[in-house]
Image: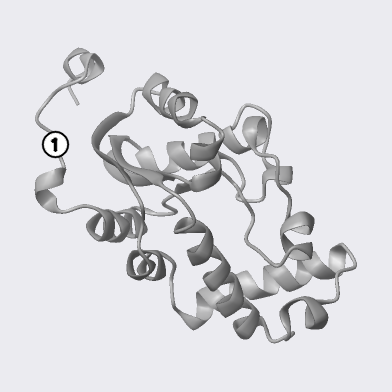
Amino acid sequence: MTERTLVIIKPDAVKRGLMGEILSRFERMGLKMIAGKFIQADRDTASKHYPDSIEWKQTVGQRTIDDCQKYGIDIISNIGTDDPVAVGEVVKKWNEDFLISGPVFAFVLKGVNAVERVRAITGSTVPTKANPGTIRGDYSLDSAITANQRSRTIYNLVHASGSVEEAENEISLWFMPDEINDQYRLVYEDLYKY
C-alpha cells in the first residue's frame, strides 16, 4: 500500500550537519521524496504540529512523570505540577520552543508502507531506547533524564508521522498542494509497477 508521510529534520540534527545522512537513509529504503523545504518554523505552525487533545497531553504528561520518578527527579520542583494533563501542556510548549529554535528541513516521503517504515528506521522517540541501526540509535546524544533535568524536550533529531491520518494532517499543515511534486518516477516504481 502506497502512503505518504511527513519527516522533519529538527534543529539539533541541522546544527550537527546530519541532514544528508538522514536523507540518505530514507532514499536507500526506496522511499520517494515528493516535497521538501528548509525553513524556520513559526510559533503557529509549531503549535498546530503538536496535538492539543487532552488524551495526547495525558499520555505525554504521564510518560514524563514516569521518567522523572524513574530517575529521581522531583516533578513538582522541576515542572511545577504533577497533574499529567498540565505536565503534557508544559511538554507541548517545550516541543514547540525546540521546533522554532532553529531551521528545520521538512519533507514528504511516499512509498509502500511509508509511515511504518519511516518510524522503524527513525527509532524510539527516547533516544536511549532506540535500537542501533536506527537514526536516533546511531546519532542521538540526548536522554529523558537530561531533558527533564534541564526542563526541556528531548533532542531526538527527527520527527516522523505516527499514522497515515496524522501524516496527511501534518502534510497539509507544512505544505501547500502545489509544493508537492509526484510527477517523476523512481526506478523501482517502473520495475515493480507501483
User: Residue at 64% of width from left, 74% of height from top?
Assistant: 61
Q: Nearer the viewer, residue 58 or 1?
A: 58
Q: Is residue 193 left or right of residue 41?
A: left
Q: Position of residue 141 (x, y in %)?
A: 70, 40
> Count the marks: how many?
1
Rendering coords of residue 19 (x, y %): 45, 31
Quick one: which residue is furthest to the right in this view?
72
58 over 121 or under it: above or below? below
- What residue is shown with label 1? 181
Q: Quadrant of the C terminus?
A: top left
Q: Is residue 129 above or below residue 135?
A: below
Please tell me whether residue 38 is drawn above or below residue 58 in the rendered image: above
Quarter of the N terminus within the rendering: top left
Displayed quadrant of residue 146: bottom right
Residue 129: x %, y % from top left: 72, 45
**Quarter-wise, where is residue 170 in the image?**
bottom left
Callout 1 amino acid: Asn
- The residue at the point 22 percent across, 14 percent down is 187
Q: 191 or 21: nearer the eye?
A: 21
**Display coloring:** one colour
Of residues 11 and 192, the one nearer the viewer is 11
* Residue shown at the point (48%, 65%) measured from the top left: 96
Q: Name which residue lies at 80% across and 83% down.
A: 76
Q: Please, what secondary structure does the residue beneath circle 1 have?
A: loop
Across and down, in percent, residue 115 comes to 39, 44
Crowd class of label 1 (few under 14; some 14 to 19; many from 20; radius 10 Å):
few
